Image (spheres, coloured by chain):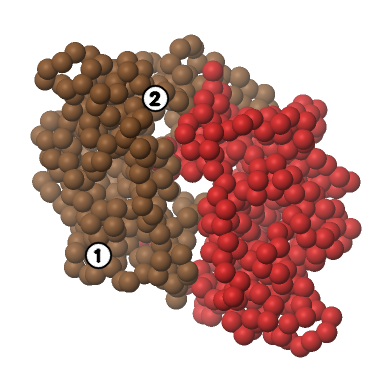
Chain colours: A brown, B red
């Protein structure tokens, strides 16, 4: 019998339906790579991007080679940096000018690298760059929310296979964040000031069925109502609203657990396409009760009309099984391809 | 300057960003077809499916050939028909047994047909079959919502290219529907009893920029805050909560406008993958203020980490342009592939 589960935080329901995994073509990974010869993120091609806004390099000069991390404005930005935020609204038509920032964090000079195979030092440098750019962007009072995210693989919406992440600063607080904050505030009120995410860590620790890995400062788990096969979350054990407030030592732990889970996925699921994104408090200190975290969603199956029409998800893999597989305790069943 | 727009109904925002259309690989259609030789939906292969629950045929016997429409239970169902709906809940873990129905509407005996190329009679028969199965399933009091939807093309999540739709009856009312009902109720209260969808038709008719086509009973429009390139909605001009209450003559008009818009998309966008789904009132008459409609979302670009992390969408095509292109008044710009 399939099982329906509600997300801890939002009203999103998921149906876990193992029989769907038997469908022809239910899981596909798909190999893919773009050409390094005209890649704007490769070392030596620095003139193919807008001028850098941050780079970690020992020698050499700005916008030349010698860097190990490089951040540049996106050449095809979703939002644009100049101008004021204007809001217009009639009864039915609400709009806001598309002011924002859209940046790329190039994670390595080498086109053929893979985030999970980089050194701990390098992944630490990526996380440092995330924070450095966040801290810079958050000073711009026009931006209400800043999303740090990564698309890996064509099926995950990446248009270049050179390892890179993105940062988008936007003039509104988007719906998923608003919803999470509302849920955390409700929980806080109804539970004597407790934090919903702290309680999730407690309950998941007790059940001990969906934890993939943990270190001093973080837990990686497959959430109770995972929307997607092998979806995992990295949640800090210290209650802290904002990613940018994480101290150095904790950031090192974060880089370590991120590298660990991506390495497990890469090895066990054969380099799947995936997205990850950091959920943190909106700018302006408006959500002190938030609890920042990172969500990873592999792209092994297409969402279809059912999900689009309902925001209700069909997931053929139970999160308990996903966690056991990612822990290496259970072998991935031979799934039809 | 990009522009942000809020959906009429929900709190979903969309950024319209033409520069994103210039990205390499921003639009892909992708040819695809599965093999008819082992297709369970082809005439003559009736024994490859569970026994039919509905068929339109003149001669011949059940589960044999001679039909032009055939409905069967899904061989890989997301929800299962037997058992009672049990709800369990602790503070964090809520679940419901996965009771429901999951059916296939085979739209034609011919594997290589395309919905938009079928005769008006045949599309009318598909719509009649949707209604007939809906009316049958709605009698089962365990089902709280019934979604009729279609996945066309691999990128839209279809695992078989033989033209077919699906019907899923589920034991909960999913989130998008709950949200829409809440928005319609709020609007009803704040606007002297007006219907939000009736008002949308009025305002869009006045603006007259996003209408693609209309007939006696329906308007096809590209919504103000379309989440996806070339997203369109078909909205009945008569205020009616539920799809199943539509009278025969209006159903004929519905089939006609559906065939028309799918034909436009097929011709102009070169047979794109797409999903469509009918939004109607939940079962049990609990949302008399709802206004049923159908939404079509082509799959020309991948949603990525940004959308997953925020429920905020980046759309490179303004709905005014999409409507003008689908009306045939403006040529599709040569988009990079």
Residue with the most extreme bottom position: B61
Q: Position of residue B6 (x, y in %)?
A: 58, 31
Circle number at residue A325: 1
Q: Quadrant of residue B208?
A: top right
Residue with the most extreme front position: A37
Foreground pick, B264 / B30: B30
Identify which residue is drawn at 25% across, 53% down. A266
Instruction: Let me know if residue A32 appears in the view.
Output: yes
Looking at the image, tell me whether mark 2 or mark 1 is earlier in sequence order. Answer: 2
Subunit under mark 1: A
Subunit under mark 2: A
Say what secondary structure mark 2 lies in.
loop
Q: Position of residue B97 (x, y in %)?
A: 46, 71
Q: Quadrant of residue A286?
A: top left
- Evaluate if marks 2 and 1 touch, with contact meaning CB atoms under 8 Å apart: no
Q: Which residue is mark 2?
A: A74
Q: Is B8 situated left or right of A133 in this image?
A: right
The mark closer to the camera, 2 or 1, is 2
């Amino acid at each position: 019998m399939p099982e329906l589960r509600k997300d801890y935080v939002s009203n999103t329901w998921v149906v876990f339906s193992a029989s769907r995994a038997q469908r022809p073509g239910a899981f596909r990974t798909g190999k893919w790579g773009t050409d390094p010869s005209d890649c704007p993120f490769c070392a030596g091609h620095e003139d193919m991007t807008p001028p850098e806004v941050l780079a970690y390099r020992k020698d050499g000069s700005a916008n030349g080679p010698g860097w190990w991390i490089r951040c540049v404005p996106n050449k095809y930005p979703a939002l644009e940096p100049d101008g004021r935020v204007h809001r217009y609204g009639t009864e039915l038509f609400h709009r806001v000018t598309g002011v924002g920032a859209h940046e790329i964090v190039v994670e390595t000079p080498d086109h053929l690298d893979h985030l999970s195979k980089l050194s701990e030092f390098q992944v630490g440098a990526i996380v440092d760059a995330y924070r450095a750019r966040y801290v810079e962007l958050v000073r711009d009072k026009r931006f209400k929310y800043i999303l740090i995210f990564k698309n890996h693989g064509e099926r995950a919406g990446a248009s270049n296979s050179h390892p890179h992440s993105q940062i988008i600063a936007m003039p509104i607080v988007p719906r998923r964040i608003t919803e999470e904050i509302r849920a955390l505030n409700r929980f806080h009120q109804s539970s004597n000031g407790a934090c919903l995410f702290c309680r999730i860590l407690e309950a998941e620790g007790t059940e001990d069925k969906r934890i993939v890995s943990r270190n001093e400062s973080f837990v990686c788990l497959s959430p109770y109502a995972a929307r997607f096969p092998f979806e995992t979350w990295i949640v800090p054990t210290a209650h802290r609203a904002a990613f940018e407030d994480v101290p150095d030592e904790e950031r090192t732990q974060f880089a370590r657990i991120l590298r660990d889970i991506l390495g497990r996925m890469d090895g066990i699921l054969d380099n799947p396409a995936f997205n990850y994104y950091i959920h943190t408090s909106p700018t302006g200190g408006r959500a002190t009760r938030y609890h920042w975290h990172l969500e990873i969603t592999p792209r092994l199956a297409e969402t279809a009309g059912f999900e689009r029409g309902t925001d209700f998800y069909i997931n053929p893999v139970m999160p308990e099984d996903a966690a056991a597989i990612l822990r290496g305790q259970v072998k991935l069943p031979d799934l039809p391809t």
